[in-house]
Image (cartoon, rainbow, N blue to C red):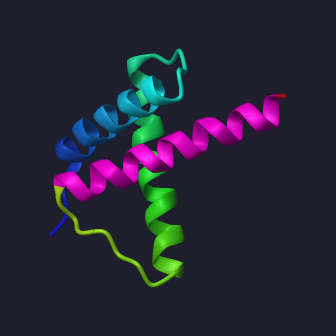
Amino acid sequence: MGLGLIASIIVGGLAGWIASMIMKADTGILLNIILGIVGAVVLNFVLSLLGIYAANTWVPQLIVGIIGASALIWIVRKVRS
């Protein structure tokens, strides 16, 4: 069953916000949502290639979103410098 659209936006926004606080990035609410959702999708894909699957509930997806968004922020910083 999955989180659904509204829950994905909420979890993505929260994950992006937490990642921006951890990485000390100055991003807005829209970019936080995008970072959280894209980060979760990318990391879920990478983990699935390794045979690891995060449950489709709030907490595991929040953790995956935070790690994925932090990785995206780190990658963008490396590309820009």
Q: Residue at x 15, y 70 (%)?
A: 1
**Quarter holding residue 79:** top right
- The quadrant the C terminus occupies is top right
Q: Determine if the magenta segment contains residue 35.
A: no
Residue 22 pos. (x, y %):
46, 29
Magenta span dominant secondary structure:
helix
Q: Is residue 40 left or right of residue 58?
A: right
Tell me where residue 42 appears, x and y as whole percent: 51, 58
- Up the image or down, 63 lies above or below 77; here it is below
Residue 65, compared with residue 74, is above or below; it is: below
Taking depth in this image into account, of 10 and 55 the one nearest to the observer is: 55
Residue bounds of the magenta highlight: 58-80
The question of residue 78 being in magenta is answered with yes
Say which quarter of the image contains residue 75. Answer: top right
**Residue that appears at 26% across and 58% down:** 60
Q: Residue furthest right?
A: 81
For the point 57% across and 46% down, the residue is: 71
The residue under the point 45% across, 84% down is: 51
Residue that lies at the very extreme toward the bottom in this rendered image: 51
When the figure is inspected, residue 55 is found, relative to residue 37, above or below; the finding is below
Residue 35: percent from left, percent from top: 47, 37
| Total residue callouts | 0
Query: In this rendering, would 6 be left or right of 73?
Result: left
